[in-house]
Amino acid sequence: MLAPPRVGSFHLCRLLWGLGYGQPTEYFNPHPIYRRALGRWGRWGSDPWLQMLARERSATSLFSGRPFFATKLQPFQRRGSYRTILERLQRPLRRAGLITADPPVVVRLQRRNWQAATASLHFSRCTGAYDLGLETTHQGLAFDQLLDPEALAQTCAEMDRHRAWLEQACRHLPPQLELSYEQLISDQAGQLARLVAALEPDIDLAAVDVQAALRRPIRREHPPWSEERRLWLQRLEAAIREGHHSSGPAGDSDPDQPGGAPPAARSRDRGHGHRPS
């Protein structure tokens, strides 16, 4: 799965996990948290590590019982090109019997509303919260830079780099199955059916059990401040669209009113939790 940040890749990973298509996560994330967590399988990036990764993080299809391995690659995981990473995975996956088709299925996940994705990225960079549960990880910017024009412009430039990297990488990869965040949210069963057809073309998608599995609900978190977060994202998206990023310093807002300082900003004890994949 190839995806820029903030396009719903964690949601798609959860869906794939539940269907038995591997246990996708950010195995190649250079963040120290992941390197420590994966170190128990051997030296990070070595062939033994990749072989263990293939064995430990595979699963069997809910529909056919076939073994599958999946991984999520994002532009900031610049451990070589996507093609290089995929080629490195070929050997251990073949040894583990997890490759039956060549080339592998490449899913390209994107978001049509790039302003919304950028707003979400900026909110996460300023609060350290990359999921709805407000479990914080690395915080790239101070929370009082949430409405700072220069900081917002910096995030916009970062998102542009992510998109350019993805476009360049995809020119040298096998044909990709394209999914969009908007389609996945509005037509989850239909988009998953497309993916199942690509992964297992002999599966009868008309089967009742398949359709039931594709339509099963995914529990969504609704923390007390989720509405406030939504309002902040709307405000940031509007600023990005309009080209002027702030109506005043973030500190001037009333934190007890909608659109005030976000809950993550109310404590300076940021911490470094584990980011969900």
Image: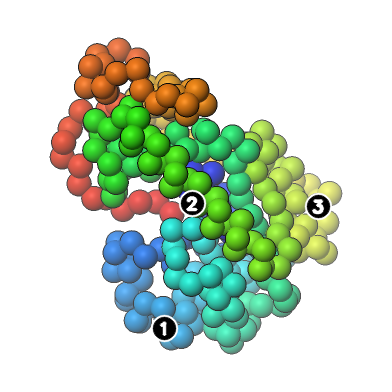
Q: On the rendered image, what quadrant is the N terminus found in?
A: bottom right
Please say if the residues under marks 1 and 2 sit with CB atoms less than 8 Å apart: no
Q: Is residue 200 above or below residue 213?
A: below
Q: Residues within 10 Å of mark 3 (few under 14, many from 20)?
A: some
In primary-sequence order, the first of circles 3 and 2 is 2
- Residue behind mark 2: 161
- Residue behind mark 3: 205
Classify residue 130 by image quadrant.
top left
Please say if the residues under marks 3 and 2 sit with CB atoms less than 8 Å apart: no
- Residue behind mark 1: 46
Q: Residue at x 20, y 46 (%)?
A: 271
Q: Residue at x 24, y 38 (%)?
A: 142
- Of badges 1 and 2, nearer the viewer stands 2
- Of badges 3 and 1, nearer the viewer stands 1
Residue type at numbered disc 1: Ser
| Nearest to the observer: residue 207 or residue 36 | 36
- Of badges 3 and 2, nearer the viewer stands 2
Helix, strand or loop under label 2: helix
Q: Residue at x 26, y 16 (%)?
A: 253
Helix, strand or loop under label 1: loop
The image's colouring method is: rainbow
Camera sees residue 264: no
Classify residue 168 by image quadrant.
bottom right
Please say if the residues under marks 3 and 1 sit with CB atoms less than 8 Å apart: no
Residue type at numbered disc 2: Arg
Q: Residues within 10 Å of mark 2 (few under 14, many from 20)?
A: some
Q: On the rendered image, what quadrant is the C terminus found in?
A: bottom left
Q: Residue at x 84, y 49 (%)?
A: 206
Task: Name the spot of residue 208 as percent of width and height, x first.
Answer: 78, 47
Q: Is residue 180 above or below residue 46?
A: above
